[in-house]
Amino acid sequence: NAGVTQTPKFQVLKTGQSMTLQCAQDMNHEYMSWYRQDPGMGLRLIHYSVGAGITDQGEVPNGYNVSRSTTEDFPLRLLSAAPSQTSVYFCASSFTGAYGYTFGSGTRLTVV
Amino acid sequence: EDKVVQSPLSLVVHEGDTVTLNCSYEVTNFRSLLWYKQEKKAPTFLFMLTSSGIEKKSGRLSSILDKKELFSILNITATQTGDSAVYLCAVDPAQGAQKLVFGQGTRLTINP
């Protein structure tokens, strides 16, 4: 039981490049979310999903796309990276959404 | 706009001291308040509070919610260096727990 697995752990991108941050969970959780964490701002919700095939926007969705084709996977795509997207990204999952979320270990992304 | 504010933002104490961390919130609807501990990587779940006046306790950590005054406190007694971390407060605004609203976090440092 690995919990929530995020890859890669670190990534450096050039402005304008695209990439996908991977998130997988093996707990059969329906709810999955992506957050970004910036200094002094806590965690902010980017996109979330309440089940396979269902996604919606959070607080800061611009510049990011998601899809949820399976219960296990919830990838986050950066379409055209910008320096403002330099951040630590966390994926989280929950069985019902009514209890505490389990977070992945994060991806530290730097856009130069 | 839903908002969660934590105070203090930073706190440095000596081992053995007792600390109180604060979390106030303004949300349109409220379902629960959650506390997380974040060391180097992923936030780990501590407590979920839904009812006023009922203390949740785990070892030296305890937390209570006041839904009338819209705040929660997290107490840590007999602090240890291993308690050093960022403590995050989040509110589930009853739009679905996939849309947690986080505070900025309190960075707690315990000196030996």
Image (cartoon, coloured by chain):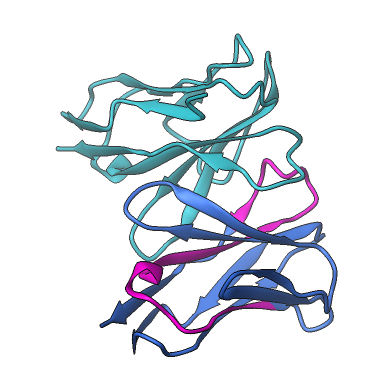
In the shown orientation, is residue A108 left or right of residue A4?
Answer: left
Nearer to me, A81 or A70: A70
Q: Who's the residue at 80% across and 51% down the image? A: B94
Residue B71: percent from the left, percent from the top? 70, 78
In the shown orientation, is residue B24 left or right of residue B66?
Answer: left
Residue A87, image quadrant: top left
- Of the 4 image quadrants, the one containing the C terminus of chain B is bottom left
Taking the magenta stretch, the answer to whether it contains residue A109 is no
Nearer to me, B14 or B32: B14
Question: A64 above or below B26?
Answer: above
Q: Who's the residue at 47% across and 20% down the image? A: A75
Q: Who's the residue at 84% across and 81% down the image? A: B68
Residue A11: percent from the left, percent from the top? 21, 30
Taking the magenta stretch, the answer to whether it contains residue B93 is yes
Residue B13: percent from the left, percent from the top? 35, 88
Is residue B25 in view? yes
Residue B10: percent from the left, percent from the top? 37, 79
Question: B32 above or below B25?
Answer: above
In the rendered structure, the colour chosen for chain A is cyan
Is residue B24 in view? no
Question: A47 above or below B23?
Answer: above
Residue B26, image quadrant: bottom right
Q: Which residues are magenta?
A: B72-101
Question: B8 above or below A75?
Answer: below
Q: Who's the residue at 43% across and 80% down the image? A: B79
- Of the 4 image quadrants, the one containing the N terminus of chain B is bottom right
Chain rendered blue: B
Nearer to me, B97 or B20: B20
